[in-house]
Amino acid sequence: MESTKKSWDKWELIAIKYLQWKWYKIIDTNYKFSRFWEIDIICSKNNITCFVEVKYRSSIKYWIPEESINKNKIYKISKTIYAYCFKNNVDIESIRFDVIAIIKWEKSYKLTHYKNLEL
């Protein structure tokens, strides 16, 4: 199980480096609201707090990473975001939910950043 977590961390680190390259300030990572509810990356840019879910697939044989964001996942993410905002006094009018989808290619990867998705 540990090797899986290290592999997952690699893709989160790629997402963090991408966000920093795009001038986002990283505020927190792997913020847990409960045992099962987590936000991968919390960052900010232009006075907007962004909550980022990172999805990775080593292949698109069965589905693309962003397809794993279903109603149940959105529910958990939105509850976690609102809990974070309440706890940290963040104005919900200045938040955004993003998804970074990463697909592994042979010796590289493809990263797609979906911004301001509906919760």
Image (cartoon, rainbow, N blue to C red):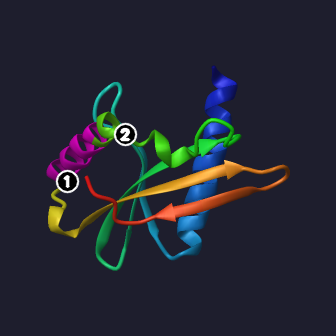
Q: Where is residue 116 in the image (x, y as percent from the top left)?
A: 34, 65
Please tell me which residue is depicted at 16% across the width and 67% down the height of the picture: 93
Position of 30 relative to 111 (above/below): above
Q: Which quadrant, please, contains the N terminus?
A: top right
Report the magenta residues as a range: 75-88
Q: Where is residue 86 in the image (x, y as percent from the top left)?
A: 14, 50
Position of 3 relative to 57 (above/below): above
Q: Does any portion of residue 14 appear in the rendered image?
A: yes
38 or 77: nearer the viewer = 77
Position of 11 relative to 98 (above/below): above
Q: Which image quadrant is residue 31 in?
A: top left
Q: Are marks 2 and 1 in contact (CB under 8 Å)?
A: no
Front disc: 2 or 1: 2
Q: Position of residue 51 (x, y in %)?
A: 36, 56
- Residue to which mark 2 is pinned: 70
Residue 85 disc label = 1
Q: Which image quadrant is residue 20 in?
A: bottom right
73 or 92: nearer the viewer = 73
Which amino acid type corresponds to the residue marked 1 in the rendered image?
Cys
- Look at the magenta stretch and give its main secondary structure: helix
Residue 64 disc label = none
Q: Where is residue 60 in the image (x, y as percent from the top left)?
A: 67, 43
Whole-angstrom CA distance, mark 2 to mark 1, is: 22 Å
Q: How many marks?
A: 2
Q: What element carries label 1?
A: helix
Please tell me which residue is depicted at 57% across the width and 57% down the height of the picture: 15
Asked if residue 3 lies left or right of residue 78, the reply is right
- Confirm whether the magenta stretch covers residue 82: yes
